[in-house]
């Protein structure tokens, strides 16, 4: 059974961001606009953890304290607070008094994942992956011109395919730069002309999410990040239906190692290992 996360947040834009991140972890979610509504939902919904916006819709410090205390009693060690960049005195006092782990709004996509993952998957530290896209084109694997032993292009193109979509990626880096730009486009396999706007895409490294984007009207998205050895993308093609994309090593000096992701059996091995750990 999928873990269920209770999201207590008044702001619609942040609720959507949290919903996408929670879904990418393989969790279901329940929304509540305030503590009182959340407490009423708890009796009807089996919940693994809760994300609480502080102070939220209730501004009375007494009500905030009483509601937070009851929520912490229902979910001991499984409540995360969502705060402003500079928490208010009421929020700071609650976090300190009850030792509540917290994430700031401006770092939501980066900090929520590792804090929540250890609560909903305490024995695993990983989540279940259902679909892995297959790498079908990597320009680093194309033959080099005769007489050329090594070259390090600034742009690398990757194309992935899954049952329902094709994803075209381009990794670009300027010479002597520590940053990389990722440009991507999602194309629906059955209907290439059908729009794919508003599709959530999560960029991750081995430590967790680095960013979240929504595709535009033609299915395009972009990220900019510090150079990483490898990254992954997770795309929500339908609610709670995610496709995972694993990049090869992104170091241009390790061209040969890029073949590992494209070798037969790599995806099966990854999926089988994930399934065994999940079991």
Image (spheres, grey):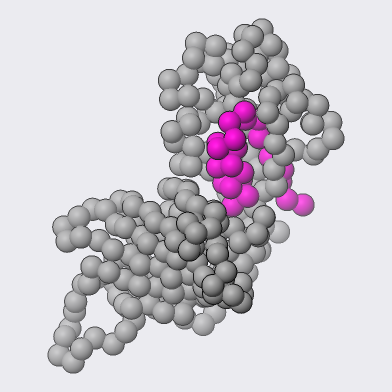
Q: Is residue 136 above or below residue 230?
A: below
Q: Is residue 67 above or below residue 30?
A: above
Q: Position of residue 118 (x, y in %)?
A: 59, 41
Q: Residue at x 38, y 54 (%)?
A: 223
Q: Nearer the viewer, residue 124 or 63?
A: 63
Q: Position of residue 106 (x, y in %)?
A: 43, 33
Q: Nearer the viewer, residue 76 or 54?
A: 54
Magenta stretch bounds: 1-25
Q: Residue at x 63, y 39 (%)?
A: 119
Res 115 quadrant in image: top right
Q: Residue at x 59, y 52 (%)?
A: 24
Residue 78 showing in the rendered view = no
Extreme residue toward the right, this view: 44
Q: Nearer the viewer, residue 103 or 58?
A: 58
Extreme residue toward the bottom, this view: 146
For residue 100: magenta?
no
Residue 43 showing in the rendered view = yes
Q: Nearer the viewer, residue 268 or 200?
A: 200
Q: Is residue 219 above or below residue 141?
A: above
Task: State the quadrant of the C terminus.
Answer: bottom right
Q: Position of residue 147 (x, y in %)?
A: 15, 90
Q: Horizontally, is 103 left or right of 144 in the view?
A: right
**How many labels were placed on the picture?**
0
For residue 4: magenta?
yes
Q: Is residue 59 above or below residue 177?
A: above
Q: Position of residue 248 (x, y in %)?
A: 40, 69
Q: Horizontally, is 108 left or right of 39 in the view?
A: left
Q: Horizontally, is 34 left or right of 183 in the view?
A: right
Q: Residue at x 33, y 78 (%)?
A: 139
């Amino acid at each position: 059974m999928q873990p269920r996360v209770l999201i207590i947040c008044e702001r619609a834009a942040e609720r959507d961001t949290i919903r996408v991140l929670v879904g990418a972890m393989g969790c279901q979610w329940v929304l509540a606009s305030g503590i009182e509504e959340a407490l009423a939902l708890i009796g009807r919904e089996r919940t693994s953890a809760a994300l609480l916006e502080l102070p939220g819709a209730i501004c009375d410090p007494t009500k905030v304290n009483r509601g937070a205390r009851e929520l912490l009693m229902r979910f001991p060690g499984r409540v995360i607070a969502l705060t402003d960049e500079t928490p208010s005195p009421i929020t700071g006092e609650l976090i300190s008094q009850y030792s509540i782990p917290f994430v700031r709004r401006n770092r939501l996509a980066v900090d929520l994942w590792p804090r929540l993952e250890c609560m909903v998957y305490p024995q695993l530290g990983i989540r279940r992956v259902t679909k892995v896209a297959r790498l079908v084109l990597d320009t680093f694997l194309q033959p080099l011109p005769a007489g050329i032993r090594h070259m390090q292009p600034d742009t690398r193109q990757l194309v992935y395919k899954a049952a329902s979509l094709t994803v075209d990626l381009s990794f670009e880096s300027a010479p002597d730069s520590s940053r990389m730009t990722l440009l991507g486009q999602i194309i629906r396999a059955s209907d290439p002309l059908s729009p794919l706007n508003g599709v959530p895409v999560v960029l991750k490294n081995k430590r967790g999410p680095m960013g979240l984007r929504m595709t535009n009207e033609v299915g395009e998205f972009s990220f900019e990040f510090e150079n990483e050895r490898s990254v992954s993308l997770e795309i929500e093609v339908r609610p709670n239906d995610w496709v995972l994309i694993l990049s090869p090593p992104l170091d241009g000096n390790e061209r040969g190692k890029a073949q590992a992701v494209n070798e037969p059996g790599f995806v099966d091995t990854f999926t089988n290992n994930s399934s065994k750990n999940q079991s």
